[in-house]
Image: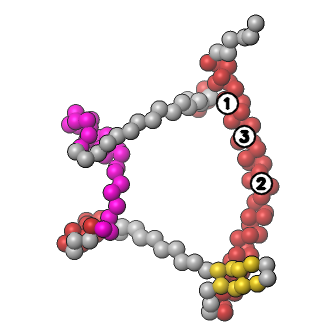
Amino acid sequence: MEKQITAADRIKKVLELRAIVDSAKRGFDDLVKPYLEDIEYNENMLGAEINRLGGQSIKTVYGTAYRTTVTSFRVADRQVWLDWVFANKARDMLTTHVAKDAIKDYQERTGATLPPGLNMTQIHRTGVRSPSDG
């Protein structure tokens, strides 16, 4: 007859497996660290060479090193930015992400289910932690 597996057995097993995976990941990270550092060094040297040559890429028989430009924007003054967006009818410069914590606060404050125009999805996940995490 097969032994009944308890919740305690499953929690113990999850924590044991997690420890094995964490150890393996640390070992892998240690193994590849010098290679990643060497890759970064060589990419930096290639970037310097591209800059020295005043170009955008270097093509060789082994492959091509190329430069790309990454651009990011960050709001420095929220009110000034929003005033400008609305004054200039530039709403296409805004995204419509929802601030989850603000919505939860609104629901708690007002007792409303949701502000108009929003849908909510909840996903339940099962987590396991050791007593020392607790």
Q: Residue drawn at (64%, 18%), measured in percent from left and top? A: 8
Magenta-highlighted residues: 92-115
Amino acid type of disc 1?
Leu
**Residue 15 numbered tag:** 1
- In-image side of 85 versus 45 (left or right): left
Residue 80 visible in the picture: no
Q: Which residue is mark 2?
A: 30
- Give the amino acid at mark 3: Val
SS of the residue under disc 3: helix
Q: Quadrant of residue 58?
A: bottom right
Q: Is residue 91 left or right of residue 44?
A: left
- Residue 103 within the magenta-colored segment of the rendering: yes
Lower position in the chain sequence, tag 2 or tag 1: 1
* Image disc number at residue 55: none
Task: Say which amino acid is labelled 2.
Answer: Asp
Reply yes or no: does residue 130 show up in magenta: no
For the C terminus, the quadrant is top right
